[in-house]
Image (spheres, coloured by chain):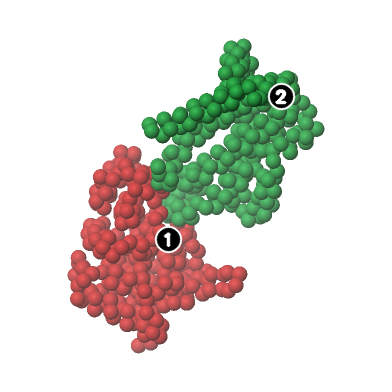
Chain colours: A green, B red
Amino acid sequence: MKRIVVSLLFFIALLAIWGIAASSGRWSPVLFPSPWSVAEYLRGALLDGTLVEAIYVTMKRLLVGYAIGLLIGLPLGLLVSSSQMLEDTVGALALGLQTLPSVCWVPLALLWFGQTEGAMLFVVVMGTVWSVIIATDHGARTIPPIYARAARTMGSQGLHLWIRVMLPASLPFLVSGMKQGWAFAWRSLMAAEIYVTILTGFGLGQLLHYGRELQAMDQVIGAMAMIVIIGSLADRILFSPWERFVHRRWGTNVK
Amino acid sequence: MNMGEAQRQGVTSEHGSGASSKLIVESVSKWFRTPRATVHALDGISIEVAAGEVVCLVGPSGCGKSTLLDIIAGLTKPDSGHVLADGQLVTGPGRQRLVVFQEPSLFPWLDVFGNVMFGLKLCPELTNGERREIAHRFLVLVGLEKFERVHVHELSGGMKQRVALARALAADPQVLLMDEPFGALDAMTREHLYDDVQRIWRDSGKTIVFVTHNMREAVCLGDRVLLMSQAPGKIIQAFDIPLPRPRSIYDVDLVGHAARIADALRGTVGGGVPE
């Protein structure tokens, strides 16, 4: 309870400083809007449906791209972890491409796919898949071999061993791998939406982009605020339950 | 008496002839190949264990006793020789020969009850009700029935090994293999477990192979103690322990037996003293 109060107070103070600075008149309100004008913009955008539409479009792209990234990344990561040859080839490739900031995929995506949803998805998948492979591979290598040994003596083998032992044993790193993948997918999508202006859907990143084009600073900051809020909410909703389960069962990081 | 004769006499159980042996290890050898060197880990090991017998393998660390246990369990393949359990050739791990490991091998994603149930769920002949009943019974046996819903990381080291023992016993294996199960525990917990383990073994009548480097532990628990030498691992001498049970680790006769085994080891490795 005390922690919530402290954190609330902090953000209220931050808003207050912003408000005071904006109303001091030192900076043009066009470049430095007050919190009220941003709130006013968000209210308007919410009411006329642009914001809901943008969030819907963005989330749809994100979830589809993320799902594809996981579907490719998780099995590939497990495969890479099980073979030295794959580690030296696919693993090395993943390690290299992971260092590439996802925005660097945008020119390629545009040339290959044009101004389409495909380009958007491509960037998100490329941003996600490598980090998921690396996290999964790394995690699978650190599963204590004793679990598989113990399970095998109890008669567990094949599919049973994978589903009942290797999968739950890998939960801690699967969660962190998926979380990392999510963070990368989110960043890639925002990069893609800002650079790829397509007409099939108008996402949050595009809202941000057009805010700049229209010199509408309240829109720019409003869109940024929404991106922050959605990012941290998704983290709470999607990953916190799993992380809590892992922490409780494994006894790690007990608060 | 030369060494070969001693080995032959020693390794054959007095409790039964070869025909009724629960477990037969026949001239098992194992080499480990690393990029730098080839290590001869086990050299022509032969052991026979009668049904219901407790055999302790002792030896200095690195003598290959854990490797031998892995081979009996079927987790490792020998380079030559073979293992017969109930007359059947061991080709892989199976729930007829369960292992209690030294490292904590409980699954952290399951609670205590779930861990004991894990092995039971792999017994298709049981109904779910029977499984739960058996799991509960064995947790009572190791004195942990109050901890059924506790997470593994919340248990002490001794409690973890009790759960591991319950998990192994619940699946009703023919042979129980114990790989220094108490090695990582403090002395007080260990001594407490000796009493429990002797009581549980007496009631269950299981055939047990117990690996340890602790002489007194071996004498306290074993009907027979096999002494192994280092590099390559060989069984150099066998000792029958005719002491009445339950045994106390502070018993004078027991300490005498342990000293005899320690002396034998010292004689063979030229002054080397086991831990």
Q: Would residue B275 appear left or right of B80 to someone viewing this image?
A: left
Residue density around tag 2, few if under 14, some if 14–19, many if 20 or more, within 10 Å: some
Query: Could you tell me which secondary element the residue under label 2 belongs to?
Result: helix
Residue B270 is drawn in which quadrant? bottom left
State the image coordinates of residue A129 (x, y, percent, origin top left): 64, 40
Which corner quadrant holds the N terminus of chain A?
A: top left
What amino acid does circle 2 point to? Answer: Arg
Describe residue B71's horizontal placement relative to residue A40 as left or right: left
The foreground one among A241 and A104 is: A104
Q: Chain of mark 2?
A: A
Q: Is residue B88 left or right of residue A88?
A: left
- Residues at circles 2 and 1 in contact by the CB criterion of under 8 Å: no
| Residue type marked 1 | Ala
Q: Residue at x 74, y 34 (%)?
A: A106
Image mark for residue B73: 1
Residue B237, percent from left and from top? 35, 79
Q: Residue at x 30, y 38 (%)?
A: B129
Q: Nearer the viewer, residue B67 or B60?
A: B60
Disc sitting over residue B267 in the figure: none
Residue drawn 24% across the image and 78% down it: B256
Work out whether A194 lies above or below B143.
above
Q: Which mark is residue A212?
A: 2
